[in-house]
Amino acid sequence: MTLKERRRLVLMVRETPLHRNHLRAMAELAELGAVIAPPVPAFYSRPTSIAEPVDHSVGRVLDHFGLESGAVRRWHQEPSSTAPGTEAL
């Protein structure tokens, strides 16, 4: 019903191992517009507790709904005009 009404559907699939039918169902849902977002811990953020990777996964999913949780640190890129080699001659 959610996809039929064109509302956002995000699936946090956590059960593994996935068998062929799981993968087929997820592929079909993705083709219909669902987002498959497994709660994979992000160790690049160097968590210091068990709660931090959980909060990060939840924060990433909330991003899909436009909700800011404050749990996800953003990567900041330098503006291209200040990147090395882009100075005006």
Image (cartoon, rainbow, N blue to C red):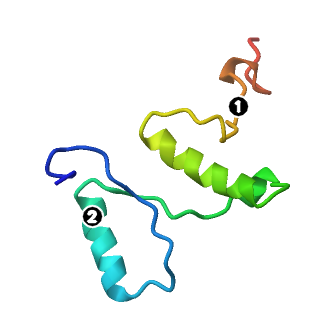
SS category of the residue bearing label 2: helix
Q: Nearer the viewer, residue 2 or 81?
A: 2
Q: Name the residue under label 2.
A: 29
Q: Mark 1 points at which residue?
A: 76
In the rendered image, the vertical position of residue 76 relative to residue 14, given as above or below: above
Q: Nearer the viewer, residue 5 or 79?
A: 5
Residue at the location (45% across, 33% down)? 66
The quarter of the picture where the C terminus appears is top right
Horizontal side, residue 71 vs residue 33: left or right: right
- Residue 13 lies, in percent from the top left, at 45, 69
Q: Distance between the residues labelled 1 and 2?
A: 32 Å
SS category of the residue bearing label 1: loop
Query: Which mark identifies residue 19?
Result: none
Name the residue furthest front: 51
- Residue 17 lies, in percent from the top left, at 50, 86
Q: Nearer the viewer, residue 80 or 52?
A: 52
Packing grade of label 1 (10 A; few <14, some 14-19, many >=20) is few
Which amino acid, by three-letter code, is at mark 1? His
The quarter of the picture where the N terminus appears is bottom left
Q: In which quarter of the image is residue 32?
A: bottom left
Looking at the rendered image, the disc whose residue lies closer to the viewer, 1 or 2, is 2
Which amino acid, by three-letter code, is at mark 2? Leu
Considering only order in the chain, which callout, 2 or 1, is on the residue closer to the N terminus? Answer: 2
Residue at the location (49% across, 34% down)? 67
Residue at the location (59% across, 36% down)? 69
- Residue 48 lies, in percent from the top left, at 85, 55
Name the residue furthest right: 48
Counting labels gives 2
